[in-house]
Image: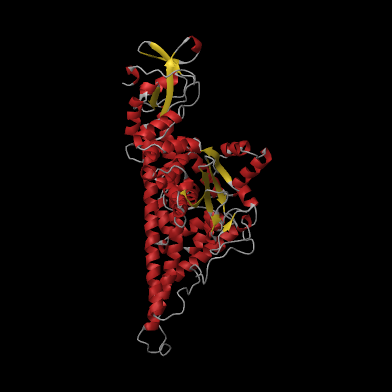
Amino acid sequence: MLLLLDIRTQARLSVEDVHELLRTSGQFDGQLPARSTLYRKLSGVGLKNERRLIEAIVRVCIPDAQRANTLREQAISLLHQAWSEDAEPDQPEPGAVPDDGGSLAELVRVQRELIDTQAQLTAALQTATEAEKESAKSRALVTTLLVLGALGRPAAGRVSTPSPDGPSYAVSGIELSRLRTRLAAAEAERDEAQQVARAAQHRLAEAENLLTAHGTGSTDPTGLSAPTATGPVEWPTTRTDPAGQAAPADTLRSSRQALPDTTAIEREVEQGEGVSSFEGHERVRSLEQDPELAEVLAEMLRLDPDGSRMGSVIDGAGRHLLDPAHTGRYLWSQLTKVEKTGLGTAVYHRMQRELGLPDGLHLDFMVAGHDVDMKFTRGSNWMFPPELQGGLCLVVRADDASGLWSIGLLRVRSELMNAGSNRDGKRTLSAQGREAIHWIHSNLSLPEHALRRLSADTVSSIFAKGSGQARTEELFLQAQLTPITTADLSAVTMQADGVKRAREARQRLAHRGVLVLNGTRPRDVEWAWGLGLPALEPSTWMSVRLTPAQPGHEGTPAIVLDDTPWCVAHPEDLEVPLPTAALA
């Protein structure tokens, strides 16, 4: 099993690649094992009885015939050794083993079990990772075709045909059903592989406990398990991953598999701030050298092409910690030190839920079948622990004072870090490291909140009012033509029913000619459009003072209330009460 794993690793072939090569080679005459069966066989389940399969895998993975024959003979020799151990268990020679009550024989048995279990765990973890990749690919394909099908399907139950204007993207029910079946099979294989890995880990722990109970000085007689650290993990002092080299071979996708289309990524890089065309091409070439990074980057762009989902995630995490309805806070700077520390964790949890990212095997979550970590900062740099060396990391930065946020992807390497570290060994990115970030979205705007845009004096005058209703009315008077969110209302009222206070303000301010509009009311949206105001988003409020249109208002956008045209008032216009039509 380990020999086959080493052969696949050197050939950079996944289980899916091997299955496809076996199918196209025609060596099994229609009796090729299913992909799920191949997963189990390569994990060591029943592999000793599959000599034909082993020889076929060696042939398709090794193009050099002479080397393939050598490895095939080595595999057959290992099979014979396995059969011999099963048929003739080792017996101690007479007089060679002292009378120890059988403890030595038990120790040998446990050590062999530990060796087998460690090998099974290694293969099971590899299988689980590859099965997760296949599941992610199938899920992405189904989602994409569902979206394209919804856009291109002319009517329910009908399949569109190509038109002269371009291809049709409608998907037939049969094709969609087939894709969903493929997705279900991939997820079942992934779950089964993860169960095998968990079972192997459990058996490994039991075997190690038995060895410890028998007084052995080491629980790793084979050298197969990971080394046990005697102190804190440290960054390597020498470079272990030369520039331009791809990620370790055992974690790369097949070199025969096409990389994601990087055209859109290249275009975004070239259009980025301060990035030349040459630098853009260099970054795209670096993606081609790191297929894992390219796949994660493409998947993040697919999940959130315009950045609106991540912007909402970051804003929601901040609002959750601010808790404006109970505290009246509206700026991140008002958070306590402990709360500021938890902002990154809140972003991580909301990001995972919003984008539907599964838990990672070792890092925060899986993206496109790859383990990815996430680091957040309100400043300009991030802290990376030494154990993240070589891994992929999504770096997020956001600041409500500037109203901007960014997210990028980085392969963490020691040569990209500053020399100094804190007491935990964490280091920050150097200037070279910041240049190595592949930005997915850079310097996008966080959702607007009126209280952040108003001056400190204006906000103070609003909060100086004695009641939540009075503060709400003052907000609408002071922040006219400014979108007001439910978070603004919660902070001003310090009540859970901030929206109710806004509805009451609509009635109370009408006598001063102030119209309070709500983006959830279709008529209010039409009025905002008719007055030439900014578009109203759902659950967003906006106030504007109106006046009857006079001869001096020619050409000004207006709406009709009670058969009278009304337009946005100038500062010098007198206050005129709104008609009852504006209050309905």
Q: In this view, does 27 lie above or below 101?
A: above
Q: How many labels does the image show?
A: 0
Quadrant for the C terminus, please: top left
Residue 404 image position (x, y, % from top left): 53, 40
**Side of 208 relative to 572 (left or right):** left
Q: Residue at x 39, y 54 (%)?
A: 37
Q: Can residue 208 be seen in this view?
A: yes
Q: Quadrant of residue 539?
A: top left
Residue 304: image location, x then y, percent: 48, 39
Color style of the picture: secondary structure
Q: Can residue 554 be seen in this view?
A: no
State the residue at coordinates (41%, 32%).
474
Viewer-proximal residue among 437 and 284? 437
Q: Is residue 571 above or below residue 540?
A: above
* Residue at x-position 46% and y-position 34%: 450
Image coordinates for residue 285, horizontal then vertical, percent? 63, 45
Query: Observer-nearest residue: 48 or 552?
Result: 552
Residue 65 screen position, x and y as percent: 58, 57
Residue nearest the viewer, comparing 478 with 80: 478
Q: Which residue is pictured at 46% across the width and 11% down the height?
A: 550
Outermost residue toward the top in this view = 551
Viewer-proximal residue among 89 and 333: 333
Give the left or right position of residue 424, taking residue 511 as reference. Answer: right
